[in-house]
Image (spheres, grey):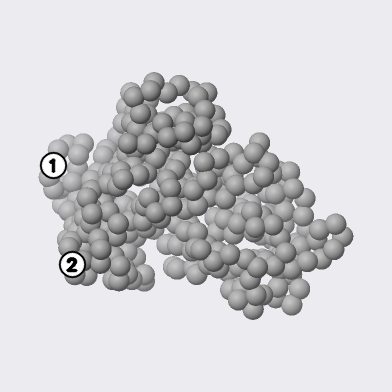
């Protein structure tokens, strides 16, 4: 299902969100848009003795480095398992050429301690795929297990959420609002509670004549015209993901947020990550602002995308990085430039 956003493009493949045991270990793509050569995102948690995946990756990159293209490529798998959405043909392959685009997903099943590799090529609108069992080194996977594993991969793919920040900004005409941006009263109450608990901000929302308003200092104002941009971005993010009791037992398999918003109170900004982590097995965020390198995060959770590569920050420098280092300052100072 494709939701057209005003400030965000939200691709939610399956309205029925299911908890799925498969998790992403590695993803590679070659020949997609700006990625002429193969680029690999490794989500393997090397801190663990067993093969496990990370729950969070923060990918920092400059404008044009490929943050958005990486997210779009990662979510390409959904087109293989949901025939109601159509894979775009224009500006799909590198430099809009006729070369085949190659995808590879390495997924782990923590219950069965199994690792599967799902590879496919897209060439002239046709799909050529193969499923491998890396646990038993069977290439390809046996027919007995193929349908079951493909079912698990399908569940994983259709439970993903991609939130892409479009370049349009507010203020926006009220008549441009789509139905999905005007939520239910229940959602608004949940969002009000989220703002209080997450960032300590109290606000009352009200719908008047199919438009969204908010109360500030006793004055009722049109939200999309008058609210602080970061508050609007946060609203769109939470509206895309959903909040409230709906997520007590169900999660997305993976959420990818391009250009993750932040708030002025830096002490509250990490709560946005916590909100996302509570709603998905795995979260990948790709902010353009360096603020998300400011907080005390393990270096293994921090990545940089540049020059057609995406790697953990430790792989970008010879310096022995330690917890508590000023990663943001190092990034701004060019310590990770090649």
Judge left or right: residue 122 versus residue 78: left
Q: Position of residue 149 (x, y in %)?
A: 26, 50
Q: Which mark is residue 277?
A: none
Number of marks? 2
Q: Nearer the viewer, mark 2 or mark 1?
A: 2
Pointer 2 residue: 98
Q: Earlier in the sequence, mark 2 or mark 1?
A: 2
For the point 62% across and 66% down, which residue is it?
170
Secondary element at image label 1: loop
Residue 150 drawn above or below residue 209: above
Q: Position of residue 216 (x, y in %)?
A: 81, 58
Image quadrant where one finds the N terminus: bottom left
- Gap between marks 2 and 1, in whole Å? 32 Å
Residue 67 drawn above or below residue 327: below
For the point 50% across and 59% down, which residue is it?
165
Residue, far right: 218
Residue 137 drawn above or below residue 224: above
Instruction: Count residues near mark 2 (Cα–Cα under 10 Å), then give few for <14, some for 14-19, many for 20+.
Output: few
Closer-to-camera residue (146/214):
214
Residue 199 location, quadrant: top right
Pointer 1 residue: 138
Q: Position of residue 338 (x, y in %)?
A: 32, 36
Secondary element at image label 2: loop
For the point 43% across and 40% down, which residue is it?
57
Judge left or right: residue 60 versus residue 176: left
Q: Position of residue 250 (x, y in %)?
A: 51, 49
For the point 67% across and 45% down, which residue is it?
264
Residue, far left: 139
Instruction: Count residues near mark 1 (Cα–Cα under 10 Å), then give few for <14, some for 14-19, many for 20+.
Output: few
Closer-to-camera residue (12/331):
331
Is any part of residue 165 visible from this angle?
A: yes
């Amino acid at each position: 299902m494709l939701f057209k956003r005003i400030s965000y493009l939200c691709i939610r493949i399956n309205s029925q969100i299911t908890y799925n045991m498969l998790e992403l270990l590695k993803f590679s793509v070659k020949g997609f848009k700006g990625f002429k050569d193969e680029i690999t995102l490794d989500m393997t948690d090397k801190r663990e003795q067993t093969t496990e995946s990370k729950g969070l990756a923060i990918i920092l990159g400059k404008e044009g480095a490929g943050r958005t293209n990486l997210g779009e490529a990662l979510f390409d798998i959904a087109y293989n398992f949901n025939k109601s959405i159509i894979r775009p043909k224009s500006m799909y392959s590198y430099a809009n050429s006729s070369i085949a685009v190659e995808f590879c997903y390495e997924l782990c099943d923590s219950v069965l301690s199994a690792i599967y590799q799902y590879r496919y090529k897209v060439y002239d609108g046709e799909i050529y795929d193969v499923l491998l069992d890396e646990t038993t080194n069977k290439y390809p996977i046996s027919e007995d297990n193929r349908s079951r594993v493909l079912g698990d991969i399908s569940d994983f793919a259709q439970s993903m959420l991609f939130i892409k920040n479009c370049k349009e900004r507010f203020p926006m005409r009220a008549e441009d609002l789509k139905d999905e941006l005007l939520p239910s009263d229940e959602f608004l109450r949940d969002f009000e509670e989220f703002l209080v608990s997450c960032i300590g901000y109290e606000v009352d929302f009200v719908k008047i004549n199919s438009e969204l308003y908010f109360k500030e200092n006793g004055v009722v104002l049109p939200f999309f015209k008058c609210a602080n941009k970061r508050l609007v971005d946060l609203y769109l993010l939470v509206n895309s993901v959903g909040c409230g009791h709906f997520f007590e037992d169900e999660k997305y398999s993976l959420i990818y947020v391009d250009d993750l918003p932040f708030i002025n109170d830096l002490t509250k900004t990490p709560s946005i990550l916590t909100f996302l982590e509570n709603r998905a097995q795995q979260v990948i965020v790709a902010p353009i602002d360096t603020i998300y390198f400011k907080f005390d995060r393990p270096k293994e959770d921090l990545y940089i995308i540049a020059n057609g590569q995406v790697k953990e920050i430790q792989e970008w420098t010879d310096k022995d990085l330690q917890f508590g280092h000023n990663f943001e300052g190092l990034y701004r100072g060019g310590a990770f430039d090649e």
